[in-house]
Image (cartoon, rainbow, N blue to C red):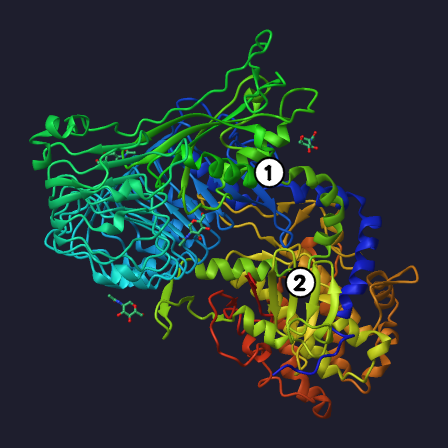
Amino acid sequence: MFIKCRLDSFFACMARRTVYFIAIFLALSSCLSARFAYGQITDPLEVSTLLAVRRQLTDPRKNLKNWDKMKDPCASNWTGVICYRNKSDGYMHVQELRLMHYNLSGILAPELGQLVHMKILSFMWNNISGSIPKEIGTITDLKQLLLSGNQLSGPLPDELGYLPNLIKLQLDLNQLSGSIPKSFVNLPKVQHFHMNNNSFSGQLPPELSALPLLKHFLLDNNKLTGYLPPEYSEMPSLTILQLNNNNFEGNVIPDTYGNMSKLIKLSLRNCNLQGKVPDLSGIRSLLYLDLSKNQLTGKIPVNRLSDNITTINLSKNQLNGSIPSNFSGLPHLQKLRLNNNLMSGSVPSTIWKDRTFTSDSKLEINFQDNLLSDISGVLEVPPNVTLMLHGNPVCRNATQRNIGHLCGSDNGDENTATVNKPVLTCPSSCPTCFEYVPGLPDKCFCAIPFGVGLLLRSPSISDFPPYRDQFNEYIIGNVKLYPYQLFIDSLAWEEGPRLRMFLKFFPQLNNDSHTFNDSEIQRIADIFATFVIPGNDTFGPYDLLNFTVSGPYSNMPLPSLKSKGMSEGALAGIVLGSIFCASMVLLGVVLLFLKKHQQLPLNAVKDKSFGKVTIIMDGVKALGFKELQAATSRFSIATQVGEGGYGKVFKVGYCDEDEEQMLVYEFMPNGSLHDLLSARYRSPLSFATRLHIALGSARGILYLHTEADPPIIHRDIKANNLLLDSKWTAKVSDFGISRLAPISDVKGVTEAHISTNVKGTPGYLDPEYFLTQKLTEKSDVYSLGVVFLELLTGMQPISHGRNLVREVNIACQSGTMFSLIDESMGPYPSDCIKKFMQLAIRCSQDETKDRPSMLEVVRELENISSALPECDNTALELNLNTVTSESSPSASAPSSSVYSKTHTYVSNNLRGSNLVSGFFTTIKPR
Ligand SMILES: *[C@@H]1O[C@H](CO)[C@@H](O)[C@H](O)[C@H]1NC(C)=O
Ligand SMILES: *[C@@H]1O[C@H](CO)[C@@H](O)[C@H](O)[C@H]1NC(C)=O
Ligand SMILES: *[C@@H]1O[C@H](CO)[C@@H](O)[C@H](O)[C@H]1NC(C)=O
Ligand SMILES: *[C@@H]1O[C@H](CO)[C@@H](O)[C@H](O)[C@H]1NC(C)=O
């Protein structure tokens, strides 16, 4: 499918380009500094978006006071705005918006959808009201949508279901309503649905069983009804299914739930469920089972549950029969509740007799209010065990049996958690803000702790102490500190049950300042704020509640953090500066493409394989990473055609390895016009062909000036950037420094020019733009005029100290114009060539007002072309009417039509214009 590649043509220009750009820097020293600054500023669209978001928020604590419209969000570290530099367009982009715990009220602006590079959007723990804007569903990069703890209401927009990269959807503790959209099945990467404590209603969509990576399904405390979809047992990654406090009235627990091989926690408490307790013995990883407060009937299945189970709660049902022996000897059991059922027979003492206890392990057995008449075997209950038998026949003669202590009516302790603080025997107390590090009791080391409030939202344990060491290891291992640096300061069980904890982190012992430095605080805070610590099977998902800072940490902008990556900015600015100038990126195409397609509806097209869905945009061809991989023989060196400022160039275009971003272009087998005219490739090129190239170029630029929406000034028209397809049709490429042309503002007033720092290529650069920094469409006209002169003379714009424009003007004035015409052209029609030369000279006038518009240029070239047969019939080697730029991007794309889960969009909308078609994508190859 790939046209034979001329290594040295199209892409080789990139090597020379570098040389050119060194020249630019020397010629225009302002460029370097301009580029430098350019690399530090935020994408203007995103700046206005942030301001629009800000306008909808009330900020009583003035946390956002540095959101100053006179300052750049990324460069001046707006609170909560975390940016990264996009190598391909040179702007800083908002990658994370973390506005947690700021008492913000107001609504979420629909404009949020324009922050297309955003990966984390967090408004947790504020008072935001209104609904979730559907526009958020267009942020395809989004990985985490964190809106817990607000007053959001209304239904979930279907659009949220088409976020190809979403991993975490955290919407709990709001007033959201309506049903869970079926469209959520289209979230191929989602792992966490945390949507508890809302008002969601209706049937759970069975379709969600196709979610390949969903681990945590937390929808407790809602108003869901209908049946429990049996298909959910097919969810390959599900570990927590927590649906307690919904109303599945009249429905049963599907038997298939016994087949959830990875399940760790099943909570269906208070769901109005009927029928039997299914056999769950096949779930070997089950740690926590809560089926209490339903109307379950029949006997408890006798098969032994998972060895690691900590909690079995079947209380408040109508279960009968005897207590099965399978509850005996479970080594990690912490809580066994069968109270308020119809259990009969005797209490098997093997439950506690057959297991060993460590000093910190406890077992609570609640069998109250049943029909138990006896206790089998040994009556002695060890101190770690609390057995509650009140309300059973066995307690009728409790004193006689000497079991009075087991028959009391108190309900045991409802999950109190205590922390054993080490007793420190240090001579004196630490200075204010400092504390002795509890993990180093014999060292008496004073340090300032950094506090982190966490909520374990669905732990699979009922008693924390036996798991304390495991928890410390889990946190320390992920935060990468020494064990003594973490201290669990407090613990409290809450409704759910959830476990609220307060952690203190201490700096290292050998730290002279006895404090963390800023970067270390930021690192630790980032770890919690961005949920990089993976959920743990035992402790479940966590929520970040707050950070507690004192002393030197108080100045840190927490809980939202400073922008990352700015410090690298200085160095990168210099290095990348040159790269930006040499930009290979079709910014213009990308812009056009985005503009054109932004308004179009997204059609979700369901693949035949259930659940795999590809979003297709109208008129856009999707290619997958695999196809590109195949097309380049896995990006092998053999298919590499060069290496540019941005990375490697393959017979598919361009690959930026760091970001895994790719730009794919039409392959232009005939290289650039520059190559064509330069001596190495000099093959006789007729006048008709040259005219055809001129017309193609002019049409391409005309398209940018007039039809592109918004209009674009190319700013770097030159022979290098005019590429030739197999039919010698010229196409305009390289929009690296293109600018949007001035467009009407709201009042309909159009500015005549844009003031910018001068960029372009010496020899092609509009002198008026150079002097005044005022950029207009006529700057492109000038550059194209120079290209016309090159076509006519075969000379370069600047060589050996000669300036082509000046030379042609002098020759014209002295009437020796024809002496400059490129002889290799062969016989040419002099009338036509004269007209072409006059047009070229008009285009390359010093003053803007003396140059024609691009439309006039195109018309004049068309006139010359149509007169061409009259001028010279034999010179016409190409049928100009059939050679249009209809080549579609697929001409250079692999033939495979496999759609992968990653989406690649081909810009097809430029068909009919003389522009190099390109498409771009961000791809994760793993
Ligand atoms: C969730 O809702 C339940 C029932 O309304 C309530 O008891 C519980 O406190 C709520 N959870 C939180 C964390 O507010
Ligand atoms: C559990 O899975 C096995 C194997 O896939 C299947 O044979 C069995 O019928 C399933 N059991 C239930 C109750 O669905
Ligand atoms: C039980 O827990 C231990 C320690 O966490 C683990 O190694 C083991 O695989 C678990 N057993 C099962 C059946 O999950
Ligand atoms: C901050 O502290 C950490 C850990 O002690 C250390 O590795 C790092 O180099 C320090 N950074 C700075 C900027 O001092």
Question: Residue 830 vs residue 559: left or right?
Answer: right
Q: Quadrant of the C terminus?
A: bottom right
Instruction: Report the front residue among 823 and 543.
Output: 543
Q: Amino acid at mark 1?
A: Lys
- Quarter of image, ligand 1: top left
Q: Say what secondary structure mark 2 lies in.
A: loop
Quadrant of the frame with the N terminus: bottom right
Residue at (49, 35) in percent of width and height: 469
The label number, if any, that marks residue 734 in the structure image: 2
Front residue of this view, candidates 848 and 334: 334
Q: Position of residue 914 (x, y in %)?
A: 60, 72
Q: Position of residue 799 (x, y in %)?
A: 89, 63
Percent across and percent down for residue 230 are 23, 62
Q: Quadrant of residue 556?
A: top right
SS type, badge 1? loop
| Badge 2: residue crowd in 10 Å (few <14, some 14–19, many ≥20) | many
Task: Give 830 or 245, whichever is nearer the viewer.
Answer: 245
801 displayed left or right of 222: right
The image shows residue 108, relative to residue 6, as above or below, that is above
Q: Is residue 841 visible?
A: no
Residue at 34% across, 51% down: 286
Name the residue located 36 percent from the left edge and 33 percent from the top edge: 499
Q: Give the amino acid type for the residue marked by disc 2 in the picture.
A: Asp
Q: Which residue is mark 1?
A: 480
Q: CA distance from mark 1 to mark 2?
A: 45 Å
* Mark nearer the N terminus (1 vs 2): 1
